[in-house]
Amino acid sequence: MADGPTGRLAVADAVAAASTGSYARIVATLIRVTGDWTLAEDCAQEASALALTRWPVEGVPANPGGWLMTVARNRAIDVLRRSSVERRKLRELAVLALTGPEPEPQPGTAGEGEIVDDRLRLVFTCCHPALALEARVALTLRTVCGVPTADIARALLVTESTMARRLTRAKAKIAAAGIPYRVPTGPMLAERLPGVLAVLYLLFTRGYDADGEPAFADEAIRLARLLDRLMPGQPEVAALLALFLLQHSRRDARRDRDGNLLTLDRQDRARWDHAAIAEGVGILARVPADGPYALQARIAACHATAASAGATDWAAIAEAYDRLVRWQPSPVVELNRAVAHGYAHGPAAGLALLAAARAGGALDGYPLAVAAEAELTARRGDRERAAALFRRAADAHGGAERRALLERADQLS
């Protein structure tokens, strides 16, 4: 029995840790057996709720995740028994009850071209291209990560009822369209995997943005770890994990005591997570040099491993952007390439590339393009024009980013 506030808090922490670690596996397994997304989610949540009442009395079990799986499975059996029409599903759940949940798969143990983990089935189903991108992100957060609907709604700037309807429609579309609950194999895996990684990338970005939800970045890293462990032959999965770790390593140094954003050159590098940096760099050692996420991770590594802002290898960063733009010829990559060349080869070179990137109009109204022009203009020595550009960029922003841009303008005035 866990007596006193300290004991109850320890049990609550144990429940939270077990639920976080097991939620996706429980939901994924129950969806595979029952085909009922709502039932699977409800049973997983009820198992966690029951743990909060029983573990303080009975103690934390030796296998917390297995305990939660057993309770969730038994709850699903009870619900299906009452429906009296789900005999096949009951048989499968009965087999699961006798055998216990499938053991954690080890990398490389699946058959040739086959990935059998239920969590991967769930991720690929949530990220199916038949669903709109926003629906994929929301469904992944809710079903794979277990993020409450209210939290997703708040982060995506909609009401909880609107988000609940979106999730319901997404699940209904999966059922109506007959979207298979499986991980594709062969050429289809190569076709579908980039879409899954794009959802994780967007999820991380939503958490890493100045006014984003930090927990989303943590969830993206957790999912990237899962994919990397279960799909060890996919270099872009490993590269994406490395990118996340290297970017997230700066999270504690990105703001000052007043909550204002700090640019990279003003951050206290002693506050960076050097263990995450070492892990990210280590992952990159086993990843081919090219590829969209590999190149972004190598750029992040140049920043993360520099002893100071002045020691940053901008020439290597500019070269990486030259290669990245061939993989991802997007206006935003062109913009970042211009900034890198401005630091590596002088502001005139950067401004020339920025003008070329803007020529087609794709960056019109994009505030970061104005901010980039402002920074390069400041480096060229035109402080008055640079300050005006920073203020113009600030007009298109809110919150922490606006304050940072205005502060930069004030420094130049």
Image (tube, rainbow, N blue to C red):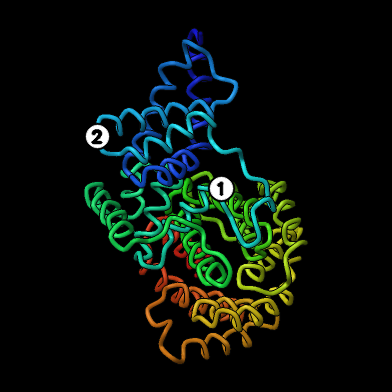
Q: Residue placed at 68% from the left, 61% from the top? A: 233
With 304 as the anchor, is 176 left or right in this view?
Answer: left
The answer to whether residue 276 is above or below residue 372 is above
Q: Residue placed at 54% from the left, 83% from the top? A: 329
Residue 377 quadrant? bottom right
SS label for mark 1: helix
Q: Amino acid at mark 1?
A: Arg
- For label 2, count other residues whose C-alpha is less than 10 Å away and answer few (under 14), some (14-19) or many (20+): few
The image shows residue 334 at horizontal and vertical percentages of 55, 81
Q: Which residue is mark 1?
A: 222
The image shows residue 238 at horizontal and vertical percentages of 66, 59
Q: Earlier in the sequence, mark 1 or mark 2?
A: 2
Q: Amino acid at mark 2?
A: Ser
With 366 as the anchor, is 220 left or right in this view?
Answer: right
SS label for mark 2: helix
Q: Residue placed at 48% from the left, 73% from the top? A: 371
Please identify, in this view, whether the residue under mark 1 or under mark 2 is nearer the observer. 2
- Asked whether residue 278 appears in the rendered view, the answer is yes
- For label 1, count other residues whose C-alpha is less than 10 Å away and answer few (under 14), some (14-19) or many (20+): some
With 327 as the anchor, is 42 left or right in this view?
Answer: left
- Asked whether residue 209 appears in the rendered view, the answer is no
Q: Nearer the viewer, residue 230 or 15?
A: 230
Do the residues bearing badges 1 and 2 touch, measured as CB atoms within 8 Å? no
Q: Which residue is mark 2?
A: 83
Tell me the CA gap for discs 1 and 2. Answer: 36 Å
Q: Residue placed at 40% from the left, 36% from the top? A: 91
